[in-house]
Image (cartoon, rainbow, N blue to C red):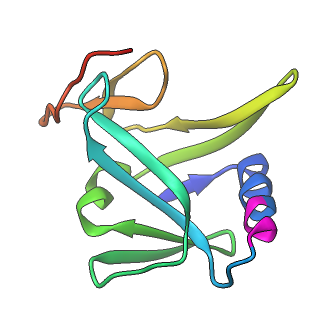
Amino acid sequence: MINISDSAMKRIKDMLAEEETPNMFLRLGVNPGGCSGFSYGMGLDDQESEEDVHLEVGGLKVVVDKESVRFLNGLEIDFQESGMSGGFTINNPNAIASCGCGQSFRMKDEEGRPEVCD
């Protein structure tokens, strides 16, 4: 369902190792908003709910809320270093358009809640 590149996996595991809270995992989600209608949520978390779907990707615990699962099937997460900076990139085969910032996308059958770009 979700693919995480080796470089992204290494970066996420490094981030988890820096955390002092035990049982942390990667949480992914989708929220209405952003330039194109929907925006990604990605972060470390240690709180789960009954509305979560649990996945294991390459030995990494990934949690997605049930509402977001339909947007993320086939999602690819990568981490790219560029000079003195780097960042995560997301490739979503379900998106028909994305914002220039790469944090927002549009779906074919749902418009979400487009907002003005800053």
Residue 94 visible in image: no
Q: Residue at x 80, y 27 (%)?
A: 85
Q: Residue at x 76, y 31 (%)?
A: 86
Q: Which of the pair 48/76 is nearer the observer?
A: 48
Image coordinates for residue 76, horizontal then vertical, percent: 54, 45
Find the magenta span and give its range.
Answer: 15-19
Q: Residue at x 80, y 70 (%)?
A: 17
Residue 35 to residue 39: above or below: above
Residue 56 visible in image: yes
Q: Which of the pair 64/23 is nearer the observer?
A: 23
Q: Main secondary structure of the magenta part?
A: helix
Residue 108 to residue 30: above or below: above
Image coordinates for residue 94, horizontal then vertical, percent: 33, 39
Residue 73 to residue 110: above or below: below
Q: Residue furthest right?
A: 83
Q: Is residue 60 left or right of residue 64?
A: right
Image coordinates for residue 79, horizontal then vertical, percent: 71, 40
Q: Is residue 50 left or right of residue 20?
A: left
Marks counted in the figure total: 0
Q: Which of the pair 96/101 is nearer the observer?
A: 101
Q: Residue 96, located in which quarter of the rendered image?
A: top left
Q: Residue at x 45, y 57 (%)?
A: 28
Q: Is residue 43 left or right of residue 37?
A: right
Image coordinates for residue 118, horizontal then vertical, percent: 39, 14
Q: Residue 70, located in which quarter of the rendered image?
A: bottom left
Quadrant, the N terminus: bottom left
Q: Does 90 appear in magenta?
A: no
Residue 5 to residue 13: above or below: above
Q: Is residue 83 left or right of residue 8?
A: right
